[in-house]
Amino acid sequence: MPEGDSVWKLARRLDRALLGRTVTRSDFRVPRLATRDLAGREVLEHHTHGKHLLTRFSGGVTLHSHLLMDGEWSVTGAGKRLPPRLQRDVRVVLETPTGTAWGLRLHQLDLVATGRESRVIGHLGPDLLHDDLDRPEAVRRLLTDPGTPLVSALLDQTRVAGLGNLWANELAFLVGVSPWTPIGEVDVPRLVDRAVTALRHSATVPGAYQVTTGTGRRGESHWVAGRQRRPCLRCGTTVRMVEEVPNDPANRRTWWCPHCQPGPGPEARAG
């Protein structure tokens, strides 16, 4: 699933393809937006907040998109089209003189006034990638309910925005506690600092995308995520995994090293 660093990198890729260009043709393939037209508007900015992408156009219009589990944006050169097998997944087309952006499987797609973007992102917590991040506010929100398990608090986008399941699991390892440790028992200011450093490093440093161990070698780029039944890279203990609770965003698939991450087990999952 795309996380905040994924969407930030996507925004930079769309910058290179669309920023400063004028849309010559738009095509919305969702019923409620089918009659809307962005032709003649200049692409001013690709702004991100957590996992949300906000494409801002001249005239005070913003296109809001969320990738959820399987959405994506693809770019083709001028006059090029996506293969026919992908056309059924296209939800929006933005054509410019130099290239075309195609939004595929975008389950959340909205057009809003730029001045009213809060309609679609106002419920979110502070974005850990923003230069003006209010760290005390991020700490305060994470501690709203001190009894919430660490991974569940990190996954709650109304507390802080941009951390998905990979980062929630890796951060629990990096601060040395069980994923189900109550957030109130964690050094939350240190946790926020660690999360900010990790997410920004992943987003901005070439070759560092979602590498948490410092090495990109196959099978060694993460401390625990995806490493069930394999030895911990730090202590050699077998990494464990518990499956997600269906339809419960607070209880996703979780990995941990019982030795390096002392504390409660899966029985302490959020209720």
Image (cartoon, grey):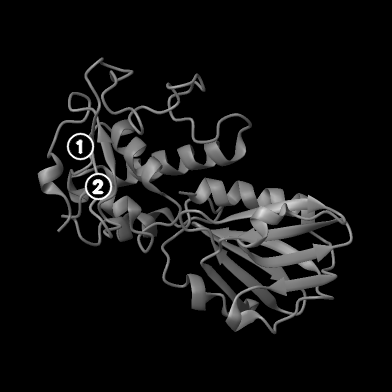
**Extreme residue in the front direction:** 85
**Residue 40 position within the rendered picture, expressed as x and y whole percent measured from the top left:** 84, 76
Q: Amino acid at mark 2?
A: Leu
What crowding class fits label 2: few (fewer than 14 Cα within 10 Å), some (14-19), or many (20 or more)? many
Q: Is residue 15 left or right of residue 179?
A: right
Contact between marks 2 and 1 (CB within 8 A): the answer is yes
- As rendered, which of 217 and 155 lies closer to the eye? 217
Task: Say which residue appears at 37% left-offset and 46% top-offset.
Answer: 165
**Residue 236 position within the rendered picture, expressed as x and y whole percent measured from the top left:** 25, 15
Q: Amino acid at mark 1?
A: Ser
Measured along the vertical axis of the image, is residue 250 above or below residue 200?
Answer: below
Q: Which residue is mark 1?
A: 178
- As rendered, which of 3 and 245 lies closer to the eye? 245
Task: Say which residue appears at 58% left-offset and 75% top-offset.
Answer: 110
Task: Look at the image and tell me in which quarter the C terminus lies.
Answer: bottom left
**Residue 43 position within the rendered picture, expressed as x and y whole percent measured from the top left:** 77, 66
Tell me which numbered mark, 2 or 1, is placed earlier along the sequence. Answer: 2
Measured along the vertical axis of the image, is residue 183 above or below residue 170?
Answer: below
What crowding class fits label 1: few (fewer than 14 Cα within 10 Å), some (14-19), or many (20 or more)? many
Identify the secondary structure beneath mark 2. helix
State the image quarter where residue 256 is shown. Answer: top left
Task: Say which residue appears at 17% left-offset and 48% top-offset.
Answer: 182
State the image quarter where residue 106 is shown. Answer: bottom right
Identify the secondary structure beneath mark 1. loop
**Residue 187 position within the rendered picture, expressed as x and y whole percent measured from the top left:** 26, 42
Q: Which residue is mark 2?
A: 150
Gap in angstroms between the C-alphas marked 2 and 1: 8 Å
Task: Say which residue appears at 56% left-offset and 31% top-offset.
Answer: 208
